[in-house]
Amino acid sequence: MSNWKMPKVLPSEITPREVYQRRREFMRIAASAALAAAMPGGLFAGERLPNLVKSAYELPDKLTPVGDVTRYNNFYEFGTDKESPAQNAGSLKTRPWTVAVEGEVRNPKVWDIDSLMKLVPLEERVYRLRCVEAWSMVIPWVGFPLAELIKRAEPNGNAKFVEFVTLNDPGQMPGVKSSALDWPYREGLRMDEAMHPLALLTFGLYGEVLPNQNGAPVRIVLPWKYGYKSAKSIVGIRFVEQMPLTSWVKAGPGEYGFYANVNPAVDHPRWSQAKERRIGDFFKRQTLPFNGYAEQVAQLYTGMDLQKFF
């Protein structure tokens, strides 16, 4: 996009690798999933991803420590509180794994996860993640633009939306035995949202293989939206003509809208969205429209009432 701009970061604001490395042993104990999913070439979750491409994307925010990122998660398939995913996600087996790309496309295909990871070079991007409970993180995610996969699928003229379908396996995911949501978990984007350069098909964080509790082996990261919009453990990507009924809209249409754009002026019915607490901080800060990415994405919603289409 012609108006694409990248905010800057000061070197002093980046967490040195040696700082978060000291927390690795604690992370491996607290998050058993970090060693559960075998990866190609002898890699396991928690190990380095090879041949990463340096990203030009920069963000002026201090990184959230990796130990917090991997032990404080929203992932209802493994439990509804923040600590349960790290405790329970070790049961998830990420090999073999396939992702079906289907629907209104000229090139439907079932991708093996290892082939998908090699589709284009992986890069590291520092993005904020904002959750509706008024907490946020800053994470260096590893992946490539979702648009790269979409281009290869070649959507036809009927494709107006992209629907993401996640794994629904009660044998591996104890949370899907509950009635917390209607499983499998489903999310969706408008086509122009999915094609935006910020939308990331994600395979890792902090330069390492994505831990199970963070959505292994593949998830979506959408930094201008609330975190629940980022589907985890994806097994299907469907191109459809009608707006898909997403899991949270179905569960609470008065609380969760399809667009899920961060709008501080629209309160959740049970809490304010005007301020947020960054994990590890004591004081709250003002929530920014579109989570601070207004300059990059606001044009996608020109003319829309963002209190009605929330």
Image (tube, rainbow, N blue to C red):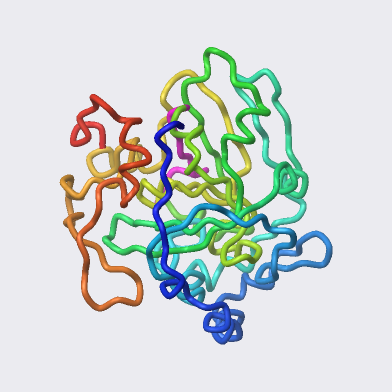
Q: Residue furthest top?
A: 157
Left or right position of 185 against 137? right
Residue stretch in magenta: 180-191
Residue drawn 73% across and 38% down?
111
Residue 187 magenta: yes
Q: Which of the 4 image quarters holds residue 62?
A: bottom left
Residue drawn 50% across and 53% down?
57
**Residue 89, percent across and down?**
58, 66
Q: Residue furthest right?
A: 41
Say which of 112 and 61 sits in front: 61
Residue drawn 20% across and 29% down?
305
Residue 167 magenta: no
Q: Is residue 94 above or below residue 184?
A: below
**Residue 143, percent across and down?**
61, 51
Q: Is residue 85 above or below residue 235?
A: below
Q: Is residue 186 above or below residue 65?
A: above
**Residue 284, percent across and down?**
21, 69
Say which of 185 and 152 sits in front: 152
Left or right position of 302 against 150? left
Quadrant in which the C terminus is drawn: top left
**Residue 194, percent across and down?**
49, 34
